[in-house]
Amino acid sequence: MIVKIENMDHNGRGIARIGEKVTFVPFALPEEVVEIRITKEKKKYNEAKLIKLLTPSKERITPICPYYNECGGCEIMHMDYKSQINFKKEKVKNIIDKYTNLKIEPEVFSSEHNLNYRNKITIHENNDKIGYMKKATNEIIEIDSCPLAMETINKYLKENKRKIKKELIIRTNEKGEIISSLQNNKMIIEINKLKFQIDINSFFQINNDICSKVFSYIENNINNCKTCLDLYSGVGTLSILASKKSKYVYSIESNPHSHANAIENLKINNIKNIKFMLGKVENEIKKINEPIDLIITDPPRSGMDKETIKIIKEITPKTLIYMSCDPMTLARDLNDLKEMYILEKIAIFDMFPNTKHIECVCVLNRR
């Protein structure tokens, strides 16, 4: 079946119409004429496989990754980088507009590197197959290296590939030092002259260049305040950042590994004005009884729960800085907050080049 691709969905799939039915075609770009085969027929839409490219888009490039069509870890590597950025910008604008009726024009921060940027990967092993887990399956796609991973990670993978049993997590820093789940040790990552100790189980952003830009952007949008509250604080990165412009910072994290690293990071950076609290945000936040000027929140992909948003509205900080890796849950939460807060700024940061994912930072001020 031959179709013309009209647009792209938020997951990076091409959209064609067959009659009145939308058909999703992975790896296809707008304006392309392609031959497809329907793989799933649903009541309201179809899913299809791209069989042959008949008329290619000017935005199309040849993916550098030999596993691209099988792996599923990247969705838009067949698109040139400038077009990737435009796709992500329009995606965020459309989602925010659709679910909040807020018209926005995000500031855009591209990644210095769109390959070899990942400072962490997870490799799986099953029945002597070693590689990435194919998306939405239990199938392993065998790999020798990953074009998105930093070269020190790929080197370590090649040297230790046959030692992997079930799973191997590999992490590196700007100096090329390695930690992995084979060693279960710790390392220091330095961003914007701040040092952060992490272990293999701690959350930390996977693109050092974009992480640096995020830190600078957030710091530039913190005015001197008396008390800051940092939610979902991980190893304390944004808390430590905020401590430079705040008299005191409360910091809440539920992961014990990250919490332990955060305590160490206070000592490493010689900071005295942060209290780290271990527990769920919706529980620990209720233990703070003093006025809060600023709340910084960086929730998981699922966004903030209703109880946390309710408490934020009760605290009514003057400023709220919201960092999100999912525009859909961000839009949902912004919609809940917009009656009390004005969205002053939004910036997008390409933390994950060649994938559909994007990081957003919003600055909201109380009405």
Image (cartoon, helix red, strand yellow):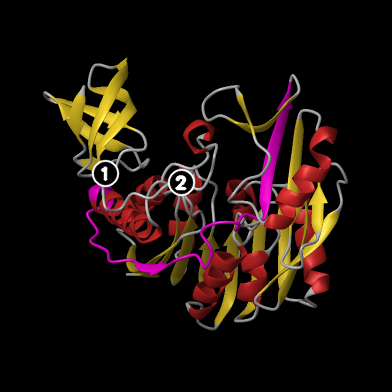
Picture coordinates of residue 327, whole percent (x, y): 39, 50
Estimate the x, y position of residue 313 in percent, counting from the top left.
Answer: 43, 58
**Which element is circle 2 on?**
loop
Q: Secondary structure at mark 1?
A: loop
The residue at 51%/31% (across/down) is 70
Distance from the alpha carbon under mark 1 to that under mark 2: 14 Å
Q: Residue under circle 1?
A: 56
Is residue 293 visible in the rendered image? The answer is no
- Residue 187 — which label? none
- Asked if residue 18 lies left or right of residue 192, the reply is left
Say whether residue 303 is left or right of residue 263: left
Is 144 or 349 nearer to us in this picture? 144
Indicate the position of residue 165 as horizontal and vertical percent values.
Answer: 81, 29
Q: Residue type at mark 1: give it.
A: Pro
| Horizontal arrangement in the rendering, residue 333 relative to residue 161 (left or right) | left
Residue type of the residue flagged with mark 2: Pro
Between 187 and 80, the one lying in front of the other is: 80
Instruction: Give the residue at the far left of this rendering.
Output: 19
x and y, in percent, of residue 170 in the image: 75, 47
The part of the image, by quadrant, that contains residue 191 is bottom right
Look at the image and tell me whether residue 77 can be seen.
Answer: yes
Q: Which residues are magenta?
A: 98-126
**Which mark is on residue 63?**
2
- Residue 364 vs residue 148, the one in the foreground: 148
For image coordinates 34% across by 62% down, the residue present is: 340
**Crowd class of label 2 (few under 14; some 14 to 19; many from 20; radius 10 Å):** some
The 10 Å Cα crowd at callout 1, few under 14, some 14 to 19, many 20 or more, is some
- Of labels 1 and 2, earlier in sequence is 1
User: What residue lies at 66% left-to-right and 62% top-to-bottom?
Assistant: 251
